[in-house]
Amino acid sequence: MQLRRTLTLTTVGLGLITLTACVALVLSTTFLRRTVDDLDRAQQSARLAASLAHQSIRFELETSPLGRSLSEANGRVLLARLNNLTRSPEERLAVADLSSQLEKHWRSAAKGDVRLAPELVSALVHLDALFATSADAESRHARTIDMVANVLGVAMALLLAAGVLFFLWTINQFVFRPVKRLARSVDRFAAGEMTARAEVRGADEIRRIAIAQNTMADALARTREDQLRYVATVVHDLRNPLAAVQLAVGYVTPKRPLPAEGRIREIFAMIDRQLRRLNSLVGDVLNAVQIESGQIVLRKTTCDLGKLAEESVALFQSMSPYHQLELSCTGSTSLRGDATRLEQVLNNLIGNAVKYSPHGSRVRVTVIGEEDWLSITVSDEGPGVSPALQSQIFRPFSRGPSEHEEVEGIGLGLYVSKRIIEAHGGAIQVSSTDGGGATFQATLPRGLSEARTEPSPALQSTSDERWSSA
């Protein structure tokens, strides 16, 4: 459930409940006001009917013509007011009948007959009873509306309270609790508990934050494991040449006679090989550290990739006479790049092909130049790279199976090569079949259009391109 949707729906629900309560309050007060007005009208009508009855009796008791005239005028005023308050047809009919009887009574008084006719008394009694009944009905209606309004008000108050409680429960269940749990897991992880992970619960936004936190924690844990493995690998690979050098130096001590000259030359040759190996290992580590820290500077110039490949092939041909190295160059192989770094990539790729393929096998190096791109392909006849290893072979310290008992290096060559290729704007990939060897192919842009805009030699140092691992 999304937090935004939950809050929106809950807020809309509370708004609808509040709006319904307001509408119900307005309607109930309106109906109650109308009922009160009707009740007041019925009561006024009943009072006017009673006043007319009293006025008729006073008219009968008056002895002077002036008193009867004033009484008649007062009766006509009361009758007009009563006629204005009538609403229903029954009331209008009763008032009309009373008005007719009163007119007869007043006319008969002028002839000397002032007695109340039975019809007039009956009309007065009927009208009074009619308005009294109407007043009672309106009073009961008013009480009913008041009760309904009270019940409706209580129901709306309870519904609104339930909505507020549900809103607070939703916020607590999907926001506050998950955030507290997430904060506790972050605090535990920050305190050094590397296994602490956040619970993936709550709203979608908080779930995504928890997943991101767990992913980050897993990445940091893997980074820590990689660092420990890195230290262990470096220490292990440095210990062997150091042990060999220490053993060789042990042949020349102050208390032992010097070996023969030939033996001394062999000892120093072994020391030289081990020191070279140490230098290579330290160089790989330094390159990896520089790449991760973004401290490598590419010094781009116009160079010939085919010539660099030819030099690398010649180097490994002399170092590994048990392999057949073949070089093929097609098209123009010039580009703008860092010749030293590109030579390092070629040495890593060819060196890996030599190390991971059996004696007597062939290693093919192909450089193909196209219009805007160059490709380097190095193929060997070794055991190949498994699909599982292909996805991680360019990671630090990844090494595949070798035909040799001991393979020098700590698994940083391909990682460094990939970052150098990517720094030039290119890409590198591997393809392989089980037992059919491996093929590494790198593509590089020529970048010769950049060379036309290079600054003068006096400013060449400012055209170096610093690149980072980002």
Image (cartoon, rainbow, N blue to C red):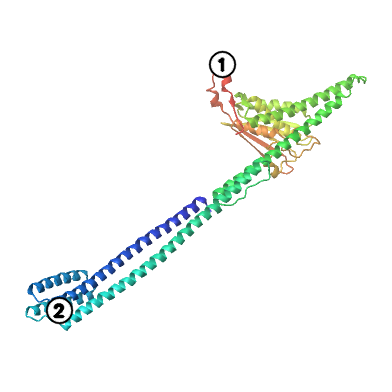
Identified by mark 2, the residue type is: Gln
Question: Where in the figure is residue 43, as x and y percent of width and height?
Answer: 26, 70
Determine the residue located farthest toward the top in the rendered image. 458
Q: Is residue 167 left or right of residue 91?
A: right
Question: Where in the figure is residue 391, as x and y percent of width and height?
Answer: 67, 42
Q: Looking at the image, is 135 positioned above or below residue 351? A: below
Q: Tell me how far mark 2 sits from mark 1, CA to CA.
A: 130 Å
Q: Dot 2: within a 10 Å radius of its alpha carbon, few (fewer than 14), some, or many (20 or more) residues?
A: many
Residue at point 17% right, 83% down? 118
Q: Is residue 111 left or right of residue 147?
A: left
Residue at point 55% right, 50% down? 175
Local SS, label 1: helix
Give the mark, 2 or 1, whose residue is nearer the N terminus.
2
Question: 349 or 407, which is in the foreground?
Answer: 407
Q: Quadrant of the C terminus?
A: top right
Q: Is residue 374 visible?
A: no
Q: Is residue 209 left or right of residue 81?
A: right
Question: 287 or 106, which is in the foreground?
Answer: 106
Q: Is residue 426 visible?
A: yes
Q: Is residue 233 left or right of residue 291?
A: right
Residue at point 42% right, 66% down? 151
Q: Quadrant of residue 351?
A: top right
Q: Which residue is mark 2?
A: 101
Question: Where in the figure is residue 92, as x and y percent of width and height?
Answer: 20, 74
Q: Quadrant of residue 352?
A: top right
